Amino acid sequence: MTSRSRSTFAICIRNDVYSASLELRKLYTVLPDDFGDQHNMIRVIDESGEDYLYPDSYFVRVELPRAVQQALEKIA
């Protein structure tokens, strides 16, 4: 498994085409997606509560401390 596929969170750094679906500087949950990985896309759960593919360049993937990840998973 690559470090890219292990990242389960990403911060939105661009939303010019998707301003209704993505909030700048917000932390999003990333879901694994082989098709997206092959096409420079990232699958996130957006503001609609559904998961969609977006350009990977709209996000910075982040590794959170284990305690933070566990806390976020409890409230999801």
Image (spheres, rainbow, N blue to C red):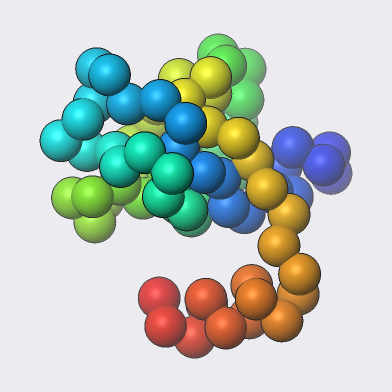
The answer to whether residue 29 is above or below residue 25 is below
Residue 71 lies left or right of residue 46; in this view the side is right
The residue lying furthest to the front in this view is 25
Q: Position of residue 65 (x, y in %)?
A: 76, 69
Q: Position of residue 11 (x, y in %)?
A: 52, 44
Q: Quadrant of residue 37?
A: top right
Q: Position of residue 48 (x, y in %)?
A: 18, 50
Residue 63 lies left or right of residue 9; in this view the side is right
Q: Quadrant of residue 55?
A: top left
Indicate the quadrant containing the N terminus: top left, top right, bottom left or bottom right. Answer: top right
Q: Is residue 51 visible?
A: yes
Tally the marks: 0
Indicate the quadrant containing the C terminus: top left, top right, bottom left or bottom right. Answer: bottom left
Between 72 and 36, the residue placed more toward the observer is 72
Residue shown at the point (24%, 56%) measured from the top left: 49
Q: Is residue 35 visible?
A: no
The answer to whether residue 60 is above or below residue 63 is above
The answer to whether residue 5 is above or below residue 29 is above
Residue shown at the point (82%, 42%) measured from the top left: 3
Residue shown at the point (71%, 42%) measured from the top left: 5
Residue shown at the point (52%, 77%) measured from the top left: 73
